[in-house]
Image (cartoon, grey):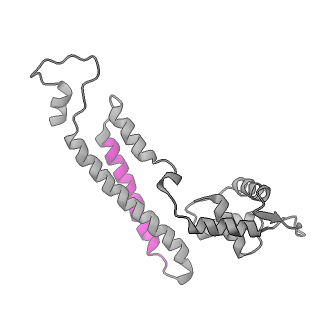
Amino acid sequence: MSIRHGLLALLERGQMYGYQLRAAFEESTGSTWPLNIGQVYTTLNRLERDGLVRPLPEHEGGQRPYEITDAGRADLALWFATPISRADRPRDELSIKLALALTTPGVDVRAVVQTQRSATMRTLQELTRLKYASDKPEDLPWRLVLDAMVFQAEAEIRWLDHCETSLVRYRPAPPPGRATRPGAVDRADEEARR
């Protein structure tokens, strides 16, 4: 999710200053994506530069609220109307880690998969516990975020199962320049069979 569009969506509710925006953002996402106040003000400065928000006069307490502009509303409406592409999401660190584990000598890829599976199962259990902790109607935005996280964790576990099955059939090619005799049994292959 874009912090930029998150802040625009919050400002669509009404005028807010930085700390209010941070609190509202975290409340809306169930604190699954904590923001630091520096991110909020940096993003507000960019939104102001781009004409999507405008600052209002400071309150007596020294807080400067912001409001969304018509251009900001148009940008927000376009964001809501545009599907999120897989290419728009950050890279998948786990798949990169496993790909590198497969090609790095001395790494026990099965152990990497098992460690991740255990961590993901613990996360899934905690998310499920949180999901059933409250069923108040005002908690729906937070529960939808939790549901997405539960489904992602379940999908990750399925993918890790697939990886483990694929590893059983995986036979790495011998490193370049390593001579093997026809019919000779490679020590690594023999260990893999055990």
The answer to which quarter of the image holds residue 26 is bottom right
Task: State whether residue 109 is above or below residue 85.
Answer: above
Q: Nearer the viewer, residue 141 or 89?
A: 89
Q: Is residue 129 magenta?
A: yes
Q: Looking at the picture, tell me which residue is in the foreground, 143 or 184.
A: 184
Q: Position of residue 56 (x, y in %)?
A: 86, 67
Q: Which residues are magenta?
A: 111-134
Locate residue 23: give its quadrant.
bottom right
Q: Could you tell me residue 133's position as x and y percent?
A: 47, 75
What is the chief secondary structure element of the magenta stretch?
A: helix
Q: Nearer the viewer, residue 130 or 18?
A: 18
What x and y, as percent, mark residue 83?
A: 52, 64
**Residue at horizontal 48%, vertical 68%?**
146
Seen at 34% across and 52% down, the residue is 117
Quadrant where the C terminus lies?
Answer: top left
Tell me the residue at 36%/59% (across/down): 155
Residue 131 drawn at (x, y percent): 45, 72
